[in-house]
Image: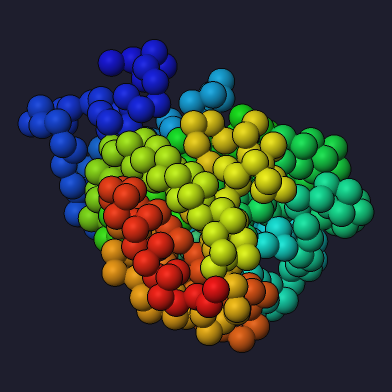
């Protein structure tokens, strides 16, 4: 199969379509070796020396993800797996230099915000949070010659705000700024940030890419193999941020059903958002697929085939009723994380702690692949029990 000639769904389903060259097996082998034999002349058969730098099982998952994210690029893109989404995200920041000014989405996954708040200063980075949905605000925050990175998450946790990637990339590039996009929530199924001009794409592969709640992994992808990319790869190797081969193997297996899972979750999320919009026990349903979401028009342009499986609800009456709704669900699982096959519900502010900017009445829903009717009935019953009318 020529990967250039088939749709991304086909590439994903067939795990790049190559049988194992030794056995002919359709499922790839897992290579657990930590080291590789050196030849008498000092060379290595395939250039690999030690697994902290290179591993064939990781490379297989990397090539598959690169094909899914970078299919639209002339030369494709390069991918490096990491031991977690946080290891991937922080590798990008840690590859910057002291004194660099960084612009970061105001609304974003709290773990990234927390790491920046705790460590960016000691790293010498000058981090500024800005509303990346407001391009005039981004333009005003740029410090010519000092701003080196714009970090965007879209849809952004947990309000699901939408940043116009093409416009943000144009703006940043005009000032010589690199753009990194956390594409965990949209996945390459719905959005391919490189096609909008992004320089780097980051994933928590723990979420949709693996999709089964049993792997912790992350990834950074680059549109070009430049010196900054070499610093990221060098950081991974020398800081020891590589995932284990078993995680990489599970990840490639998870990605085989990525399209089915993401499409199904997106359809059900839209159904749930539409069904509960205007519900008397709620003050808001936050979902970019709803026509009254402030980012809907951009999302409709930028996300292809769905608006993702993540939504949030704001419960009338505040934190108490929100926690009552949380306690009352029977099908949704009360748990953190997102992007798995089972639907999850979480009181985000409770998970993030007292410094969280998330409203106390907000419950975050990660929609899985269950029968939509079961999820709707569960939420309906929980709202009936938990929230005041
Ligand atoms: C959008 C986003 N980025 C990054 C991360 C961090 O990923 P991990 O938990 O794999 O370290 C998460 C985790 O929830 C996330 O939701």
List x then y, in percent, for residue 133: 76, 50
Is residue 315 shown above or below 25?
A: below
Name which residue lies at 63% across and 65% down. Answer: 283
State the residue in front, 9 or 68. Answer: 9
List x then y, in percent, for residue 161: 66, 53
State the residue in front, 261 or 165. Answer: 261
- State which quadrant residue 385 falls in: bottom left
State the residue in front, 61 or 95. Answer: 61
State the residue in front, 60 or 304. Answer: 304
Number of marks drawn = 0
Name which residue lies at 57% across and 43% down. Answer: 289
| Quadrant containing the N terminus in the rendered view | top left
- State which quadrant residue 315 falls in: bottom right
Is residue 111 shown above or below 198?
A: below
Residue 8 appearing in the image: yes
Residue 62 appearing in the image: no
Q: Residue furthest left?
A: 23
- State which quadrant residue 23 falls in: top left
Name which residue lies at 33% across and 36% down. Answer: 260
What is the basis of the colouring in this image?
rainbow
| Quadrant containing the C terminus in the rendered view | bottom right
List x then y, in percent, for residue 298: 69, 37
List x then y, in percent, for residue 251: 30, 49
* Left/right of residue 305 with respect to residue 40 in the rendered view: right
* Left/right of residue 56 with respect to residue 24 in the rendered view: right
Q: Residue furthest front?
A: 389
Name which residue lies at 72% across and 76% down. Answer: 121
């Amino acid at each position: 199969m020529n990967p250039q000639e088939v749709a991304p769904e086909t590439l994903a389903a067939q795990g790049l379509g190559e049988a194992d060259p030794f056995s002919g097996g359709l499922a790839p082998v897992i290579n657990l070796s930590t080291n590789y034999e050196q030849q008498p002349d000092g060379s290595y058969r395939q250039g690999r020396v030690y697994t902290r730098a290179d591993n064939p099982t990781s490379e297989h998952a990397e090539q598959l993800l690169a094909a899914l994210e970078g299919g639209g690029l002339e030369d494709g893109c390069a991918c490096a797996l990491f031991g977690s989404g946080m290891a991937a995200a922080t590798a990008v920041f840690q590859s910057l230099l002291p004194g660099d000014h960084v612009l970061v989405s105001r609304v974003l996954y709290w773990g990234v915000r927390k790491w920046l708040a705790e460590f960016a200063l000691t790293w010498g980075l000058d981090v500024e949070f800005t509303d990346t949905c407001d391009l005039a605000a981004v333009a005003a925050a740029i410090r010519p010659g000092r701003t080196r990175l714009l970090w965007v998450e879209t849809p952004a946790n947990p309000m699901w705000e939408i940043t116009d990637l093409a416009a943000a990339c144009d703006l940043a590039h005009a000032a010589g700024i690199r753009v990194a996009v956390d594409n965990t929530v949209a996945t390459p199924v719905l959005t391919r940030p490189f096609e909008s001009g992004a320089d780097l794409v980051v994933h928590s592969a723990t979420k949709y890419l693996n999709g089964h709640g049993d792997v912790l992994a992350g990834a950074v992808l680059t549109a070009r193999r430049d010196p900054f990319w070499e610093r990221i790869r060098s950081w991974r190797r020398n800081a020891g941020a590589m995932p284990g081969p078993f995680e990489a193997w599970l990840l490639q297996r998870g990605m085989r059903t990525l399209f089915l899972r993401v499409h199904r979750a997106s359809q059900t999320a839209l159904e749930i958002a539409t069904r509960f919009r205007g519900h008397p026990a709620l003050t808001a349903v936050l979902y970019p697929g709803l026509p009254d979401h402030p980012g809907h028009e951009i999302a409709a342009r930028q996300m292809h085939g769905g608006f993702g499986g993540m939504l949030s609800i704001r419960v009338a009456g505040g934190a108490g009723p929100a926690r009552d709704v949380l306690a009352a669900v029977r099908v949704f699982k009360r748990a953190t994380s997102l992007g798995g096959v089972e639907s999850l519900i979480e009181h985000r502010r409770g998970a993030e702690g007292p410094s969280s900017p998330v409203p106390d009445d907000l419950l975050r829903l990660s929609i899985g692949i269950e029968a939509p009717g079961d999820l709707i009935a569960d939420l309906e019953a929980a709202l009936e029990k938990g929230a005041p009318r």
